């Protein structure tokens, strides 16, 4: 595991994407990120004190459908060791970790040539969320303690690397943990298409073996499954 550090960068994922040669598990770390990307090109701009890092794995494990869920599982596993009220820490499919109703971590996985780039942003010691103040939370706000950002990054990447090759063998137990600790568990959602919300209500069922979200419409008996879905919790 090698590290490359930047005081400021547009995006750690973008940096890796632009490299002619990508080395597996070389970790790109930034103190500040000016043009970080989330799912569907949403912006993740963070101030100093956040864990902002990316690394790549070789894309030869047939893991496209599992990698984001697995990454979230690893981050969840590490963060819950620091939090007393562990039941308040949850997964929000497909790529976020929440504490109560606020986001503490976002994940973006991108396929680039023969690699999958994994970008992770975690609010650790940073508390300046600007317009996202009501939607975000940091580890320091939960526990009242400041942390070594580099120490948490190393812990996450090391755990990821150690457990990565057993992913397929352990997938069912990982899914069980993800579903038991889902932010969407017991919640109703409406689907968003072209910026508009549907009138029909759906209930979250589970994340299935292929990493898809499974939902069911109110009064219906047929499950619907999606690899990608825009929705709003109601």
Image: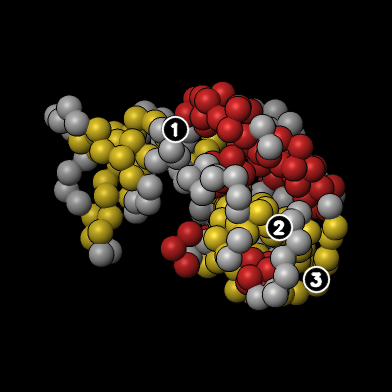
Disc 3 residue crowd, few under 14, some 14–19, many 20+, Cα 10 Å: few
Residue 210 horizontal/vertical position (percent): 43, 38
Q: Residue at x 55, y 60 (%)?
A: 110
Q: Is residue 43 left or right of residue 117?
A: left
Residue 106 horizontal/vertical position (percent): 57, 53
Residue 75 vs residue 141, the one in the foreground = 75
Q: Which of marks 2 and 1 precedes in the sequence?
A: 2
Q: Residue at x 83, y 67 (%)?
A: 5
Q: Which of marks 1 and 3 precedes in the sequence?
A: 3
Q: To which residue does mark 1 refer? A: 209
Can residue 91 be seen from the camera position used here? yes
Q: To which residue does mark 2 refer? A: 55
Mark 3 or mark 2, whichever is nearer to me: 2
Q: CA distance from mark 1 to mark 2?
A: 25 Å
Can residue 234 be seen from the camera position used here? no
Residue 140 vs residue 170, the one in the foreground = 170
Q: Residue at x 81, y 48 (%)?
A: 154
Residue 147 horizontal/vertical position (percent): 82, 47
Q: CA distance from mark 3 to mark 2?
A: 14 Å
Q: Residue at x 54, y 35 (%)?
A: 90
Q: To which residue does mark 3 refer? A: 6
Disc 2 residue crowd, few under 14, some 14–19, many 20+, Cα 10 Å: many
Q: Which of marks 2 and 3 precedes in the sequence?
A: 3
Q: The residue tagged with tag 3: helix, strand or loop?
A: strand
């Amino acid at each position: 595991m090698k590290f490359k550090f930047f005081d400021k960068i547009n995006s750690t994922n973008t940096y890796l994407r632009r490299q002619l040669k990508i080395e597996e598990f070389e970790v790109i770390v930034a103190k500040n990120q000016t043009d970080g990307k989330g799912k569907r090109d949403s912006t993740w701009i963070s101030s100093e004190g956040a864990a902002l890092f990316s690394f790549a794995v070789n894309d030869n494990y047939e893991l496209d459908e599992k990698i984001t869920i697995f990454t979230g599982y690893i981050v969840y596993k590490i963060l819950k060791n620091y939090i007393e009220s562990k039941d308040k820490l949850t997964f929000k499919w497909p790529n976020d970790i929440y504490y109560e109703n606020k986001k503490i971590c976002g994940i973006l996985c991108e396929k680039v040539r023969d690699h999958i780039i994994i970008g992770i942003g975690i609010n650790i010691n940073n508390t300046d969320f600007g317009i996202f103040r009501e939607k975000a939370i940091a580890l320091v706000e939960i526990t009242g303690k400041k942390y070594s950002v580099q120490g948490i990054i190393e812990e996450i990447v090391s755990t990821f690397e150690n457990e990565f090759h057993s992913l397929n063998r352990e997938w069912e137990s990982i899914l069980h943990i993800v579903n038991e600790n889902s932010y969407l568990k017991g919640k109703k959602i409406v689907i968003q298409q072209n910026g508009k919300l549907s009138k029909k209500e759906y209930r979250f069922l589970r994340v299935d073996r292929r990493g898809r979200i499974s939902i069911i419409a109110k009064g219906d008996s047929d499950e619907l499954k999606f690899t990608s879905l825009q929705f709003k919790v109601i």
